[in-house]
Image (cartoon, grey):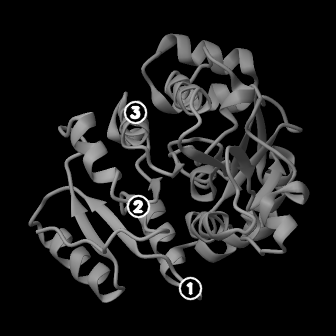
Amino acid sequence: MTTEHPSGAESALVIGTGELGGSVVGALTQRDDPPPVTVLLRPSDTPRHVRLRAELAASDVAVVEADMATATIGELAAIFGRFHTVISCIGFAAGPGTQRRITEAVLQAGVRRYLPWQFGADYDAIGRGSPQDLFDEQLDVRDLLRAQDVTDWVIVSTGMFTSFLFEPDFGVVDFATNTVNALGGWDNAVTVTTPEDIGVLTAEVVSARPRIANQVVYVAGDTITYRELADIVERTRGVPVTRSEWTVARLLDDLARDPDDSMRKYRAVFAQGRGVAWPKAVSFNASRGIRTTTAEEWLRKHLGA
């Protein structure tokens, strides 16, 4: 079943309700003068989806349904065209080509404003041909947007999710052995932001006056070097940590031995140090005086959780 708010001058469609999408929807609906918000969901009658629809309805959030894996660009455009603003919160897990397809549908529909799923690194600075081949599609999206002048776009660069920095599979912080592994060098930096903060800042970008359009907006929950990260882990856990440097050469060699390993791709591109960090002091949130969660605050909250 599909419900939908009437198309308003500032109506917003959020694609996806995962960790990021849920945060964006929550932040939009909690503003003093919220826009009409609709969420695009995959058709499903699973208990989770039934519960999710009920929760959205309780927050006056409407639902429209489409299967992103099978819907054509024309079918998606027919949906997107009913909204003023489209915010995509579906990431790489949706599969290769998804970001291009969504963007092509947005442009075909003539949507007035689009925030693509670019909640991550500065892909312009990283460039094409990086160790993480998924990033090239992000540059395809930027090329499509910059080549037209009908749809206003805003890219919100956030760095990695704060939680990902401490993800065991990522391998930077190993709590079992109290080890921190620096990607590329101890003075390399990384910008991190929590999904909750991204939601708040995205809502602020959408609502900003004068309107923000056709530019990259940099936000930062925190920007730290791997040396500072090791100090944080040591301070919060109260025990010395072993510090190990993983050089770019080593990480590229690791990737060459297993070129399909996504974590090895991420480690190698972050070790190269391009487009993965920017000063928090010059971020959008700093300029607006919006407080964000630091890496140390996140770790203290989740330590032992």
Question: Marks 2 and 3, how far apart in space?
Answer: 16 Å
Point out the frontmost of discs 2 and 3: 3
Residues at discs 1 and 3 in contact (Cβ within 8 Å) = no
Question: Marks 1 and 3, how far apart in space?
Answer: 30 Å
Q: Position of residue 90 (x, y in %)?
A: 40, 49
Which residue lies under the disc numbered 1?
Answer: 33
Q: In this view, does 293 lie above or below 117?
A: below
Residue 104 circle label: 3
Q: How crowded is mark 2: few (under 14 residues within 10 Å), some or many (20 or more)?
A: many
Q: Where is residue 221 in the image (x, y as percent from the top left)?
A: 73, 62
Residue at 11% across, 66% down: 46
Q: Which amino acid does label 1 sit on?
A: Asp
Residue at 67% across, 50% down: 213
Which residue lies under the disc numbered 2?
Answer: 14
Quadrant housing residue 286:
bottom right
Q: Which amino acid does label 2 sit on?
A: Val
Q: Where is residue 194 in the image (x, y as percent from the top left)?
A: 61, 63
